[in-house]
Image: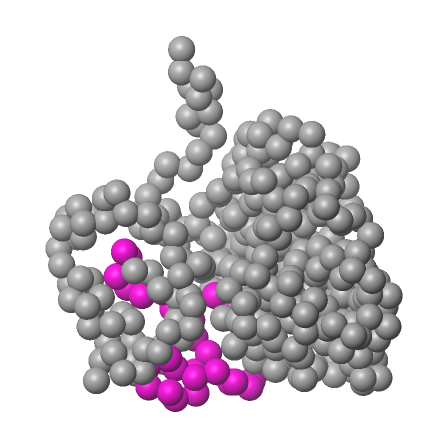
């Protein structure tokens, strides 16, 4: 008997194009939210299947990771089902009173299907589980307290990857040029060597990476570690709700959904990777086998067919059937991982 037979209905089997088309026919609005919690989950696989059943009934879309150490979720919920979703979420002791970080720029098209996966860690740090105490975290600061600490000269550290901070970051922040979180932890420790007694401010998209980073720094002897509560997402929400709070974030906040970015200030601090003109719009190369994430302005999108190189442009023009045949057997995991800094400025010249 197939051990996975009972799970066949616990996966979304609709193709990407069909799912997107269905999303655009919906006659209701969606609310994009994110949340996380480090909490012991005894059986992540069983939890995953149970959540899939509950959330599918409510037409929840998004990307959710579960591990023994907790949950990390970025989702969209139909507004008519919002209260029911919160009730279902709150019914589990592990997720009771879960703080929701609601997107401020939201057209409801952030996700087009529900994906729940179990992983070894919800944030991969390259360390063994239990090597440091992830419950011993830094002080959580709201937007006002964060701004005051910045004004007092605290050291600000961006705990995101280079392609995120490239389009937006806090004024004067240390922005490590890292590709992954596991690369960034030792770099930050090295950058902050000798500053163990100084006030440290950590921030990331929604707070989950800072939660681990603050524990990691405290484990290594840093005494005054602080983190932006709810990350940049919640900081932006507080700016909208209280106009007396000054905005110290410049540019856009990179988000891990179909939008790829949420504008926080009108500043454009990045440049098109092909022509060098001011631009902060991330795209994925139209050649699906490549799928490189890079910054491309509208002119270059039109001129270069949404591709990063002439080779990719040629490939993208092949018949769909041939592209699919060529892609078979090739691992395509580049959407958020194949984005190392590459000079694309000369590729089409």
Is 236 on the left-hand or right-hand side of 339? right
> Residue 85 location in percent, x, y?
64, 42
Image quarter of the N terminus: top left
Q: Which residue is drawn at 71% across and 55% down?
A: 212
> Magenta stretch: dominant SS?
loop
Is residue 317 depicted above or below 247 in this figure? above
Is residue 77 depicted above or below 294 in this figure? above
- Is residue 230 visible in the rendered image? The answer is yes
* Residue 1 located within the stretch drawn in magenta: no
Is residue 85 depicted above or below 304 in this figure? above
> Residue 119 location in percent, x, y?
56, 40
Is 325 on the left-hand or right-hand side of 24? left
User: How many marks on residues?
Assistant: 0
> Residue 69 location in percent, x, y?
68, 41
> Residue 205 location in percent, x, y?
62, 64
Q: Which of 104 and 3 is in front in this view?
A: 3
Is 235 on the left-hand or right-hand side of 308? right
Is 137 on the left-hand or right-hand side of 68? right
Is residue 220 depicted above or below 174 in this figure? above
Q: Residue at x 49, y 71 (%)?
A: 163
Q: Give the range drawn in magenta.
A: 260-289
Q: Which residue is drawn at 21% across and 84% down?
A: 349
């Amino acid at each position: 008997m197939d051990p996975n037979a009972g799970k066949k209905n616990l996966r979304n089997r609709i193709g990407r194009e069909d799912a997107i088309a269905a999303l655009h026919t919906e006659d209701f609005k969606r609310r994009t939210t994110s949340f996380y919690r480090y909490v012991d989950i005894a059986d992540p696989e069983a939890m995953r299947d149970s959540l899939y059943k509950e959330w599918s009934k409510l037409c929840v879309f998004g990307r959710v990771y579960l591990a023994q150490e907790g949950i990390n979720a970025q989702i969209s919920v139909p507004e008519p089902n919002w209260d029911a979703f919160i009730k279902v979420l709150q019914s589990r002791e592990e997720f009771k009173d879960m703080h929701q970080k609601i997107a401020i720029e939201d057209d409801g098209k952030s996700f087009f299907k529900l994906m729940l996966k179990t992983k070894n860690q919800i944030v991969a740090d390259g360390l063994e589980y239990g090597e440091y105490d992830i419950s011993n975290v830094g002080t959580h600061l709201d937007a006002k307290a964060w701004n005051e600490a910045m004004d007092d000269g605290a050291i600000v550290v961006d705990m995101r990857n280079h392609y995120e901070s490239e389009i937006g970051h806090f004024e004067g922040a240390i922005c490590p040029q890292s590709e992954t979180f596991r690369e960034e932890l030792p770099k930050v420790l090295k950058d902050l060597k000798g500053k163990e007694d100084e006030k440290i401010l950590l921030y990331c998209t929604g707070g989950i990476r800072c939660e681990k980073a603050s524990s990691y720094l405290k484990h290594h002897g840093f005494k005054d570690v602080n983190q932006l509560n709810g990350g940049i997402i919640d900081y932006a929400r507080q700016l909208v709700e209280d106009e007396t709070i000054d905005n110290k974030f410049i540019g856009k906040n990179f988000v891990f959904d179909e939008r790829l970015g949420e504008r926080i200030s009108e500043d454009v601090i990045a440049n098109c990777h092909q022509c060098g003109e001011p631009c902060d719009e991330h795209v994925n190369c139209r050649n699906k086998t490549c799928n490189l994430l890079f910054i491309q302005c509208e002119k270059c999108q039109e001129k270069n067919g949404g591709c990063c190189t002439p080779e990719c442009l040629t490939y993208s023009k092949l018949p769909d059937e041939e592209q699919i045949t060529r892609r078979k057997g090739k691992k395509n995991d580049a959407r958020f991982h194949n984005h190392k800094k590459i000079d694309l400025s000369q590729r089409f010249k």
